[in-house]
């Protein structure tokens, strides 16, 4: 998470974070306690995250900036 990605849509931010960390959806699901299908829907912009979901993902990714925006 080297650059500021706060202006990115959530799905693009999530894809960039997963790519940078070389993390699978399954691993993120385990670390965040979310279902893999939930993360997949977020990644494909089929769903927007709640603040709680965004925070859980941010913690699992080691980010200090939860993203719940578009």
Image (spheres, rainbow, N blue to C red):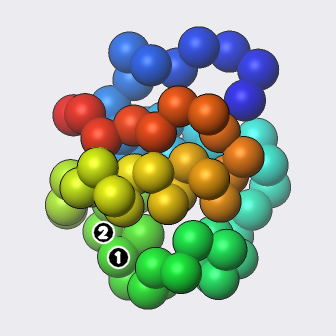
- On residue 18, which mark appears? none
Q: Residue at x 25, y 33 (%)?
A: 69
Q: Is residue 5 left or right of residue 2?
A: left
Q: Is residue 27 left or right of residue 41?
A: right
Q: Residue at x 30, y 41 (%)?
A: 68
Q: Is residue 31 left or right of residue 65?
A: right
Observer able to see residue 3: yes
The residue that mark 2 highlights is: 41
Disc 1 element: helix
Quick one: quadrant of the N terminus? top right
The residue that mark 1 highlights is: 38
User: Do labels 2 and 1 touch, CB within 8 Å?
Assistant: yes
Quick one: quadrant of the C terminus? top left
Q: Is residue 58 above or below residue 56?
A: above
Q: Residue at x 42, y 69 (%)?
A: 39
- Residue 4: x, y in percent? 59, 14
Q: Nearest the camera: 13 or 65? A: 65
Q: Is residue 19 left or right of residue 4?
A: right
> Quarter of the image holding residue 31?
bottom right
Q: Is residue 66 above or below residue 38?
A: above
Q: Nearest the camera: 53 or 9? A: 53
Which mark lies nearer to you, 2 or 1? 1
Disc 2 element: helix
The residues tagged by marks 2 and 1 sit, at their Cα atoms, a distance apart of: 5 Å
The local crowd at label 1, few if under 14, some if 14 to 19, many if 20 or more residues have their Cα within 10 Å, is: some
- Residue 24: x, y in percent? 69, 70
Observer able to see residue 18: no
Q: Residue at x 29, y 49 (%)?
A: 51
- Residue 22: x, y in percent? 80, 55
């Amino acid at each position: 998470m080297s650059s500021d990605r706060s202006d990115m849509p959530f799905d693009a931010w999530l894809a960039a974070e997963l790519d940078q960390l070389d993390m699978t959806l399954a691993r993120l699901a385990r670390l965040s306690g979310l279902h893999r299908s939930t993360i997949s829907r977020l990644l494909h912009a089929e769903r927007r995250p709640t603040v709680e979901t965004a925070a859980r993902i941010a913690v699992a990714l080691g980010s200090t900036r939860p993203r719940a925006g578009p």
